[in-house]
Amino acid sequence: MTIAVIPSRYGSSRLEGKPLALVAGKSMIQRVYEQAQKSRAVSKTVVATDDERILNAVEAFGGYAVMTSDDCRSGTDRVAQTAGLLNLGPDDIVINIQGDQPVFNPLTIDELISPFAHDPDLVMTTLAFKIKNKREITDPKDVKVTFDNNGFALYFSRAQIPYPRDKETKADFYKHLGFYAYKKSFLDKLVALPTGTCEHIEKLEQLRVLEFGFRIKVVITQYDSPEIDLPEDIKRIEATLL
């Protein structure tokens, strides 16, 4: 079974009530939910929240939501708690979908989970997109990822990685899109780990996986997934829907 979970908090330092912000007439959480539902690989889509306003909004448009603890340290913990509430088995696949990327392509979900079919030892995957907009290479808002020759993550950073020492050196840069898939058994193990040092410094929870010696398979997708952080981002996203 493959379950998609969308962790959703009401509070946001840059855009309060972001999940309920309207994007071309629909709440952002509804748009994310509907995109997830279009994936052929997803058996069930769930919004995991700690706020009744979000719960009520999801139920109003016919979606499914659960209430989780208000003291989860990250979206991953909220996803894990939801997987527990649904009584998933250890080999079930749990997908963590970002709640602020309302126009992601549903095909990326199929791409995200495809490596599990070929590698029985795989425990976690994520998505990356080859950067086309040069601004994103150095913008700390856009997380970068480097990976080894087998496609496993070496590091994630808000800084430019890799950094060409010689200016004439040509390099490709990849943006991390923040979608994850885990085996339920590994997800339980992950949330039991303490916060990692680099995770704390960069404020990137996926670094906890690498710091404790586990591997993340990086799937390169041709589909970008712009996120909404600020009110002005909404107009930019709405323009893509016209």
Image: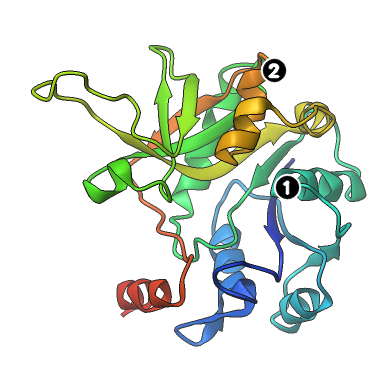
* 14 relative to 190 in the view: left or right: left
Residue 153 at x, y percent in the picture: 49, 22
Circle 2 crowding by C-alpha within 10 Å: few under 14, some 14–19, many from 20? few
- For residue 164, the mark is none
Task: Look at the numbered discs 2 and 1 and tell me whether their residues touch, using CB distance below 8 Å.
Answer: no
Above or below: residue 139 compared with residue 50: above
Above or below: residue 154 compared with residue 98: above
- For residue 74, the mark is 1
* 236 relative to 181 in the view: left or right: left
Between the residue at mark 2 and the residue at mark 1, the CA separation in whole angstroms equals: 17 Å
Q: Is residue 3 visible?
A: no
Circle 1 crowding by C-alpha within 10 Å: few under 14, some 14–19, many from 20? few
Write the residue at 39% across / 76% down: 232
Q: Could you tell me the amino acid type at mark 1?
A: Ser
Residue 218 at x, y percent in the picture: 47, 28
Write the residue at 86% across / 34% down: 89
121 or 232: nearer the viewer: 232
86 or 14: nearer the viewer: 14
Residue 173 at x, y percent in the picture: 29, 33
Q: Quadrant of the N terminus?
A: top right
* 71 relative to 33 in the view: left or right: right
Residue that extends furthest to the left in the rendered view of this protein? 168
Above or below: residue 231 compared with residue 109: below
Q: Is residue 155 visible?
A: yes
Secondary structure of the residue carrying tag 1 is: loop
Identify the residue position indicated by label 2 in the image. Answer: 212
The answer to which quarter of the image holds residue 121 is: top right
Write the residue at 48% across / 24% down: 155
Q: Could you tell me the amino acid type at mark 2?
A: Phe
Secondary structure of the residue carrying tag 2 is: loop
Residue 131 at x, y percent in the picture: 28, 42
Q: Quadrant of the C terminus?
A: bottom left
